């Protein structure tokens, strides 16, 4: 019994010696990696920052690089559509004043997207193909342009909302328009245009002869409200403004009939179209909106 106990003690001692040798030869930090239990690192999922929405409050015009060819696009109602799909006289005039010399000519290309519509239809002009007479333009936002002229759409008022409600809708639409233009075309300049003034006494007299003088004045006043609101929006948001409206008034503050088409007493006459084109061209050139 004693011999068995001694043998057992020897066996236990031998086993402990083997364990000690193993530990000495293969300590924890030298053990094969597949024998070491490693704890997976605790990671915190990265949070995706919420993008800050762009809110338009004041316009800061970009610097346009000097080029040999500039492209201008125009949006607005039928008052601007009267200039023609490619600007007509405006294009001729601008190309004449930007042509410095035969050795260094600068060319102006104009695409006029304006049509008989109100400000709430502006998204159609931005996102859809548009056919003007025999010309078809691609979606405006897909075009690479240097300058966009935004006319007031004042001759197509939002009468269904009443005056105050309509002007509020106009401002909301202009907010949305400025936001999308700035975010999609940050390197293009934006200029507002206030078109010629209607005549209170004669507005639409040729096409609506049965209207009374009071009714004609009310129609003209409504359109003036939208044009003036367009002017105020540009002024309060630091947007360059071509104020043709103010320059088309007579001394008594009414729309000058020389600029109004006698066949409908609404749209620009030939003189009016020429006047609008020269005012736009001179403003862009004199203010160096497109470098010379």
Image: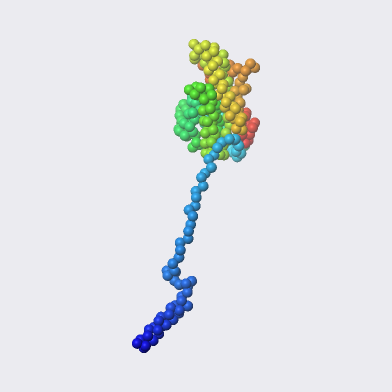
Q: Nearer the viewer, residue 178 or 240?
A: 178
Among the 4 quarters of the image, the one containing residue 154: top right
Q: Quadrant of the N terminus?
A: bottom left
Q: Residue at x 61, y 19 (%)?
A: 249
* Up-down relation of residue 60 to residue 262 (above or below): below
Residue 225 in the image, given as x and y percentages of width and height = 56, 22
* Up-down relation of residue 137 to residue 156 (above or below): below
Among the 4 quarters of the image, the one containing residue 240: top right
Q: Which residue is at the far bottom? A: 3
Among the 4 quarters of the image, the one containing residue 17: bottom left
Q: Is residue 203 visible?
A: no
Residue 6 in the image, given as x and y percentages of width and height = 39, 86
Residue 279 in the image, given as x and y percentages of width and height = 61, 26
Colour basis:
rainbow
Q: Which residue is at the far front? A: 1
Q: Residue at x 45, y 33 (%)?
A: 128
Q: Residue at x 47, y 72 (%)?
A: 28
Q: Residue at x 58, y 20 (%)?
A: 197
* Up-down relation of residue 290 to residue 263 (above or below): below
Q: Quadrant of the C terminus?
A: top right
Q: Is residue 31 visible?
A: yes
Q: Nearer the viewer, residue 103 or 16?
A: 16
């Amino acid at each position: 019994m004693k011999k068995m106990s001694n043998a057992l003690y020897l066996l236990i001692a031998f086993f402990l010696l083997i364990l000690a040798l193993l530990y000495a030869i293969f300590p924890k930090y030298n053990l094969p990696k597949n024998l070491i239990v490693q704890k997976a690192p605790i990671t915190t999922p990265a949070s995706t920052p919420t993008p800050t929405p762009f809110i338009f409050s004041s316009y800061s015009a970009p610097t346009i690089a000097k080029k040999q060819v500039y492209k201008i696009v125009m949006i607005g109602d039928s008052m601007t559509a009267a200039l023609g799909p490619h600007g007509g006289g405006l294009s001729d005039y601008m190309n004449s004043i930007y042509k410095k010399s035969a050795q260094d000519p600068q060319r102006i290309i104009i695409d006029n997207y304006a049509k008989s519509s109100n400000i709430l239809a502006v998204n159609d002009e931005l996102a859809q193909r548009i056919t003007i007479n025999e010309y078809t333009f691609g979606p405006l936002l897909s075009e690479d342009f240097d300058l966009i002229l935004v006319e007031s759409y004042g001759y197509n008022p939002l009468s269904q909302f009443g005056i105050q409600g309509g002007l509020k809708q106009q401002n909301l639409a202009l907010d949305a328009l400025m936001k999308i233009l700035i975010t999609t075309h940050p390197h293009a300049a934006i200029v507002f245009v206030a078109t010629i003034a209607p005549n209170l006494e004669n507005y639409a007299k040729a096409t609506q002869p049965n209207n009374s003088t009071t009714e004609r004045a009310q129609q003209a006043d409504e359109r003036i409200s939208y044009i003036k609101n367009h002017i105020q929006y540009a002024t309060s948001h630091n947007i360059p403004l071509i104020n043709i409206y103010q320059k088309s008034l007579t001394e008594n503050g009414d729309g000058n009939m020389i600029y109004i088409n006698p066949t409908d007493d609404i749209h620009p006459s030939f003189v009016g179209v020429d006047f609008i084109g020269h005012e736009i061209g001179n403003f862009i050139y004199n203010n160096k909106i497109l470098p010379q």
